[in-house]
Structures are given as C-alpha cells and as structure tokens.
Image (cartoon, rainbow, N blue to C red):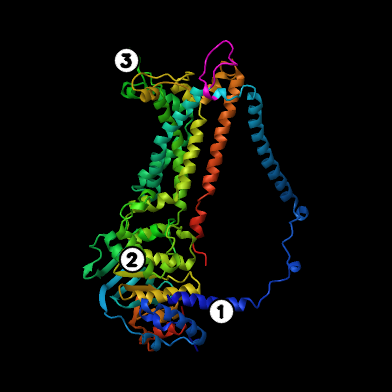
Amino acid sequence: MGGQAVDEALHGRVMASAQTLDRPARNTIARPPRESHASWPLADRLCHALCWATGIGLCLVTAWIVLYMLVKGISALNLKLFVESPAPSLRERESGGFLDPLIGTFIITAIGMAFAAPAGVGIATWLTEYARPRWLARAVESGIETLAGVPSIVLALFGLLVFARGFFSFLSGSTNGGAVSGKSFLAAGLLMSVLALPLIVGTTREALTQLPSRMREASFALGKTRATTIRRVLLPSIRPGIASGVVLGMGRIIGDTAIIVVVLGASPKLQGAGGAPLLSTLRGSGSTLTSYVYGFSPAGEGNSPQKAYAAAFVLLMIVLALNGVVTRLSRGRSLDTIEQGAKP
Amino acid sequence: MPPPIRRIVVDRHPHMAKPAPAGNGAGVANGGVAIATSLAAPSVAERTARAPAASVRERMHVESLWLAYGENWVVRDVTLPVRQGEVLALIGASGSGKTTLLRSLNRLTEITDSAARAGRITLDGQDIHELEVTELRRRVSMVFQQPNPFPMSIFDNVGYALAERPDGRRRRRRRSAAIEHAVHDALHRAGLHDEVGEDLERSALRLSGGQQQRLCIARALAAEPEVLLLDEPCSALDPISTATIEELIVGLRERVAVVIVTHNLQQAQRVADHVAFMHLGELVEYGPADQVFERPARQRTRDYVSGAFG
C-alpha cells in the first residue's frame, strides 16, 4: 500500500541525514555525579538519617519476629506436623500435628472469599460506575467504611447471637433438644467475608477509578451499553487490582482469631454436624491455625508451646507468601501498560 | 499583514485517490520515485481536482442545532448536511463548538448531565433522538484524538463492536467465520492488515501511536457504520502516521460519510471536500474546500484562514 511507501521513503531520508551526525566520543560523555549530602541543611540531613533509621528498623523488627518464631518452633517443626491430626496425649511434644487446623484455615478462607469476592467486586463496580441514587451511594460508602473498622470480636459476638436463632439452623448443627449451636464453619465463614469485604471493595474501586475515562468513551462510541462495557472492558482490565484485593482479604481472614475462637468453637479436630459429608463438615466445628496457636501458646493451655511456635511460623510464612503474591500481581500487568498507550 | 499560509510538504501518491489493489506493485515503485522528485505540495485546486466520489448522497442533516453545557450555549443555530462520498471538515479556533457539534452527532454529549439541546439531527431522515442510542452509535462511529485501544488483543479490539458475547479463550477455536471475515476486512480498510496481519493475538498496546490510531479506525469500521466521526485523529501523531491516516480517510469516503474536526488548516486543505468554519458556536461559513480556503465569502473566514487569529 502506498502508505508504506511513504513511510519507507521518509524514513530513508531521515536516516540518511542522521548518519552524518556522529555520537560524542565516549570519554567526553559526563554522567550526573552522585549527590553529596555535605551541602544539605541540618534539618534535611536529620530527616534523611531518620528515614534510614526507621526503614532499617522496620526491616529488623520483621526479621526478628520471623526468626524468633522459627528458632522457637524449629525443635517441633517437622513434616509430620502437616499431616497428622491433633492428638491429645500425655507426651504432647511428640503427638499429633496440625492437619485439621490447617484444613480448617483453608475451609474458612474459601468460604469467606466465596462470598466476599463477588459481593465486593459488585459493590465497588456499582459505587464507581452507577452510584445513583446519590443518597444510597453515600450510605453504602459509609457502611463499607464502618464495616472496615468493626473489631472482629464484636463481629464474632454478633455472629454468636444471630446464628444461634432458629432461622439459621441450616448453617450449623443443632442438639437433640432443638437448640441451634450457631457455631460452624459456615457461620464463621460468613463473618469472615464481612471482614474481607471492605478490602476488596477498596482495591477494586481504586483500580476502577484509575482507568482512563477515554476507555469508557471508546466503548460507548461503538454502541455498547454501560453494563457491556463493564463486563467486557473494565473488569478484565483491572484483574490485577481485583486479585490483589482478594489476596489481601485472604490474608486478613487467615490471621483472625476472635471469630474462630468464639464462633467456630475451636475444637482441635474437625467435627461434623451429621448429614451429607461435605455439608456435615461445613456445618460442624473445628479449628484453624490461629486458634491452634492460641490454644497451645503459653496464654492458652500451654501444654506444648513449641507446637504453637511452629504453627505460628507456618502462619507467618503463609501470610508473607500471600503478600508476595499481591506485590507480584500489582506490579505485573498493572495500569502502567494501559497508560503507556501511544509510543511514537 | 497576516503571515502567509505555510504548506506542509506531503508526498502524495497519484494512485491513492482511488484504492486500486491490482496496481499495488506499480504503486510502490512509483511512490518511491515520486517522493524523490516532487517537493512542492499540490495547491488546493490541484488536490481537489482528484476525482470526486462516484455518488454523493446525504446521510445526516443537522437542522438549527443549539447545544448548551449548563448556562453556556456552545453551539448556536447550526445547519449542516453530512454526505456520503465526501469528507466534511469542521474547522475553527478553540472553543468554537466544533468538537461539541461532532459529539452531538452520535449523542455522546448525553454523557454529560448538564447538556441541553434544541433543534434536530436526522440520520437517513430519522431523528436520532428517537433511535435507540446504542443502535445509533453503531451506525455513527467515532474515533478520538488520543488513540485508545482496549487492553486486549488486536483481534478482540476490532471484533469488540461485533461480538455480542465475550470472546474468551475457550471460544478462540470456535470463532465464527463471519466475525473473522469482518475483522480482516476492517483491518484492510484501515490499512493495518499488512503490518499486523500475521499475528492478531498480540496485545494492541504494543503497537506504535499511528498503528494504534489506525486500529481505532478499524475498530470503528468493523460494524460497517454509515457515518465516521473523527475528532482530531492526527493531533497526537508524528507526520508519517498523519500522512498515512489522511490517505486512509480519503479512501474511506466512498463507503462512509466522514466528518473530521481539525485544528490544522493544512490538514483540512489536504483532506476535505466540504468545509464548515465555526466561530464561537456559530456556523460562519460552509462550502466546498477550495472556495472556503481560496475565495472565502466572509471576512472572519478570511481572517482565520490566513492566520490572523486562532
């Protein structure tokens, strides 16, 4: 096509003229010198030193926590712990592991995320793209912010009272006398999803508002409705943002103890509530790594603190790994690639 | 004494007036020779002496249009025809209302809450405000100033306007032949197929600026619109890409009515068949390009075209 001929010919003329210019000799190129702090005013130097101190201090504190747990728990940390259920015995140090609590952690996280992720993305999308009527949008925003600040023990207490009512008997097992126990994985999972919801709503909203409006305009100009635009252009573009919100939510759920201890019952092994296999587990009680740590720590029953430290170390590693995943996700296919746009 | 108009040197290929696939080989060779020897831009009269489109028929008509944002009347009592087979250029200084007028042609002004309008715009005789807005926008497509491809593959970008359901990974193998054909056709019409045809699954964000803008044009053409609106499509691009897109625009006018808003008077001279000059919301002059640029009827037009303001 003629356009290419135009391109090539103009390029040829430009390149021909460029070749007459030589680059400067290598030993004459000067790079910018390292900035010396000696000329700074005293206040600046103090602040600089303070920044360094706090940064290094924070790294040291983090390293200290992780290493301390590792050192304390290393004596009890072995692969057996991961595959054996807790087994009470006189010689606690050698018996049992935290398989059931580990499974409990996974179940709780899965239930929490199953509710929080779709709800969070939906709420965030509505708040960003529609937000009409305005009073409802303001109310929803305040509600999310309030939920973000509710202490988990308060939430746990709320769950304990509400889920013990007869209406919610499907969520947990009941005794023969008809009293609903109100303590189960499902109940705790629902409360956990409330914990994770504000995080997901926050990150998704931020990602959506950062999308340039010309992307929406382009889609409207092609004759697509707002819903189609959201579904086919906007949400796929913010996948990294949603993913990091989800992982942050998971981190919060994994680390919570109050709801587990109050609403899940913290029984060391998984106990079903009777009925179909999977549903029985979900409606039954059990424990997670957090309540396991609490139970075995010196603050709890304190029989075998080494196991508590080992479990705490495992918990830390899980959370750190999740944070690493968040960092990788948000740095990966981030909005930078959208903003790069036209390169001439 | 106002400064004279400086004509930008553009290498025009004599074959480009009519798209002729058979003559491509000869065209490239000719193009190389022509560029080396011709340095003077053709005058307006020479350029408009290219063959006009085979048939010219009116697609849209703007009748006494008034548009306001809030209390501000941005477009005042404008009446214009938009015809297939010709390129209509809207020129004027900043704030003259030309972009608002363009956006009202596919009802994009409705996105702003404070917009108010009076008057009528018709598409093939039908008032556009009685049409479903999504259907209107499929028939009247728009390309914006900044290239804005979606962060998807090239194929998904161009096929976006066509596919009613999302083209997920699992559907790739079962893509309908109709969509494939339409996408390839749109890429050909946009002059992009030669450059990206081998690998349509590449991300659209990796293309250069000119290629992205041509991709946006292909995306707008994929749904076979009747009217194509271009809002300063070349203002963010380098001269080579600009020249490519201008030739493309001229080639498109056979099948779609083209309306282009441009700040660049020389670009309007190169590309337009009819020109509408707007100033502060009013339509000052409308007529064939050579008449508006060389024998303007109004003093204000003469001032603007000669560079006295704007």
Image: A257 above or below B290: above
Residue toward you, A321 or A262:
A321
- Range of magenta residues: A82-97
Q: Disc 3 designates what residue?
A: A178
Local SS, label 1: helix
Image: A35 above or below A202: below
Q: Disc 2 designates what residue?
A: B141
Q: Disc 1 designates what residue?
A: A13
Label 1, label 2: how far apart the Cα atoms are: 36 Å
Q: Earlier in the sequence, mark 1 or mark 3?
A: 1
Give the amino acid type for the residue marked by disc 2 in the picture: Ser
Q: Is residue B134 left or right of residue B305?
A: left
Q: Is residue A86 magenta?
A: yes
Circles 1 and 2 in contact, beta carbons < 8 Å: no
Local SS, label 2: strand
Badge 3 crowding class, 10 Å Cα cut-off, few under 14, some 14 to 19, many 20 or more, is few
Q: Position of residue B212 (x, y in %)?
A: 45, 65
Q: Position of residue A243 (x, y in %)?
A: 47, 43
Picture quarter containing residue A64? Answer: top right
On the same chain: label 3 and label 2? no
On the same chain: label 1 and label 3? yes
Q: Residue furthest right?
A: A38
Residue toward you, A131 or A104:
A104
Picture quarter containing residue B136? Answer: bottom left
Eye-nearest disc, 3 or 2: 2
